[in-house]
Image (cartoon, grey):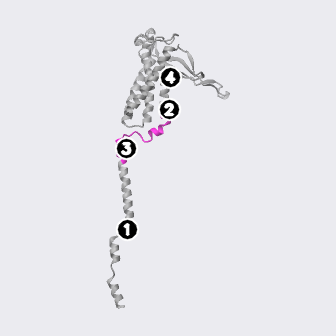
Amino acid sequence: MKQGHKVALLVLLVLLIDQALKFYIKTNFELNEDVKMFGLEWARLHFVENKGMAFGIEFNIDYGDFDFGKLLLSSFRILMVTGLIWYMRMLLSAKAPMGFVYCVGLITAGALGNIIDSTFYAMIFSGGYHDDGIAHLTAFGQGYGMTEHLPMNGFLHGRVVDMFYFPITTITLPEWMGGDSFLFFSPIFNVADASITVGIFSILLFQRRFFRDGFMDEEKKEAVAVPEIMDAELVETTDADAADESETPSASSEQEAGQSDPAAERRSDDA
C-alpha cells in the first residue's frame, strides 16, 4: 500500500469513528444527558453542543441576530483543512518522515470531523440548542437551522456535538494562591478534538526525530550520499597504496643489491 493511501485510510478511519459516535449520541441522548462509562464516576458520556472550537471554546461575534463569529469560524476551518491537505501532499512528495505525516493526518481528520458538524448538522437534525427532546434526522435543509431561522437554513451554522467528560478530581489551591477550587478535567470533547490534540502533542514530543534530517527526497539524498561514498573509497585506496609502497622494496634497490662492486673484487684478488 502506498504511503499516501495509508494516510488517507487513517483520516477516513478517524472520520468514521467520530461521525458514527456523534450520530449515536445525537439520536439517542437528550441534551445534557449524562451516562457513566464502565460505571466510573470520573468517566462519562455527557451530551452537549457548542458553537465554537475544540473543547467547547466559543468565538462569539454577533451582528444583530446574525452569528458572524460562527460563519467566520466555519469558513476558517474549511480554509485550514484545504491548506492541511495541500501540506500533506507536499510532505508525501518530499518523502517527509511518515510519523510527521501521520500527525498532520490526525489534525486534518479532526478538523474535518468538526467541519461536518458545523456545515451540515443544522440542516439534517431536528432539535436545536435549547430543545430538550432527542433529535432525529430530517429532510435536507429542514433541520433546526430552519426552525431557528439561521441563514441559509443553517448551512455553516451547525453546532458541534461533544460527549466525552472526565471530571477526574477537584483541586483546591493553597490559601497563599487564592484558595480557589477547580475541576480537573472539565472540558467536554469529541473524537475529532482528541485526534487534533494527539496530532499536535505528538509533533511537539517527537519534533527532534521528525526534523533532524530535514525534508529531502530520495534522489537528493542519493546525490549527496554518492560523492561521500566515493570520497571515502578514494581515501581508503590511497592509504592502502601508501602502505604497500612502504612495505615492498623497490625493484631498483633489489637490482643494486644483487650487483657486486668490480673495484672491490679486484682489491680482494690483489690481496
Tell me which numbered mark, 1 or 4, is placed earlier along the sequence. Answer: 4
Identify the residue at image location x=34%, y=77%: 258
Which quadrant, please, contains the C terminus?
bottom left
Q: Mark 3 = which residue?
A: 221
Q: CA distance from mark 1 to mark 4?
A: 78 Å
* Contact? badges 1 and 4 (CB < 8 Å): no
Crowding near the residue tagged with mark 2, few <14, some 14–19, many ≥20 C-alpha atoms within 10 Å = few
- Counting from the top left corner in percent of width and height, residue 92 is at 38, 34
Q: For the residue marked with disc 4, what is the amino acid?
A: Asn
Q: Is residue 51 visible?
A: no
Q: For the residue marked with disc 2, what is the amino acid?
A: Phe
Q: For the residue marked with disc 1, what is the amino acid?
A: Thr
Q: Mark 4 = which residue?
A: 190
Secondary structure of residue under mark 1 = loop
Q: What mark, if any, has residue 19 been given in the picture?
A: none
Crowding near the residue tagged with mark 3, few <14, some 14–19, many ≥20 C-alpha atoms within 10 Å = few
Is 1 rendered above or below residue 129?
below
